[in-house]
Amino acid sequence: MPTNKPLSNIKIELTINELNIVLEALAKQPFMDVYKIIEKIHLQANAKSEHTPQKNK
């Protein structure tokens, strides 16, 4: 029985390699089914990288 309650967000921490595996798996799915999820991942990754200090080489 479906409910109209909003879904809760969860926080998952992945390494960059793990995230790339998830994105590769999503890329094999139909675009219309996954494009919003991929966009959300990219937006969150970009926001995280803006707040992470860069190491000088």
Image (cartoon, helix red, strand yellow):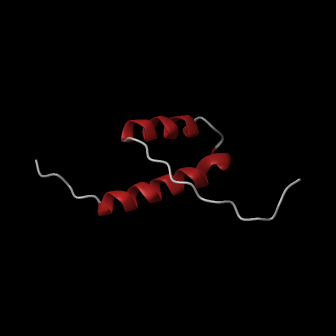
Q: Position of residue 7 (x, y in %)?
A: 69, 60
Residue at the image point whose x is 83% and y is 60% from the top: 3
Q: Residue furthest left?
A: 57
Residue at the image point whose x is 43% and y is 43% from the top: 14
Residue at the image point whose x is 12% and y is 52% from the top: 56
Q: Position of residue 57 (x, y in %)?
A: 10, 47
Q: Position of 55 compared to 22: left or right?
A: left
Between 18 and 3, the one lying in front of the other is 3
Q: Position of 15 compared to 33: left or right?
A: left
Say which quarter of the image contains residue 50. bottom left
Q: Position of residue 22 (x, y in %)?
A: 51, 38
Residue at the image point whose x is 39% and y is 62% from the top: 47
Q: Residue furthest right?
A: 1
**Number of numbered callouts drawn:** 0
Q: Position of 53 compared to 29: left or right?
A: left
Between 54 and 6, the one lying in front of the other is 6
Q: Position of residue 9 (x, y in %)?
A: 59, 58
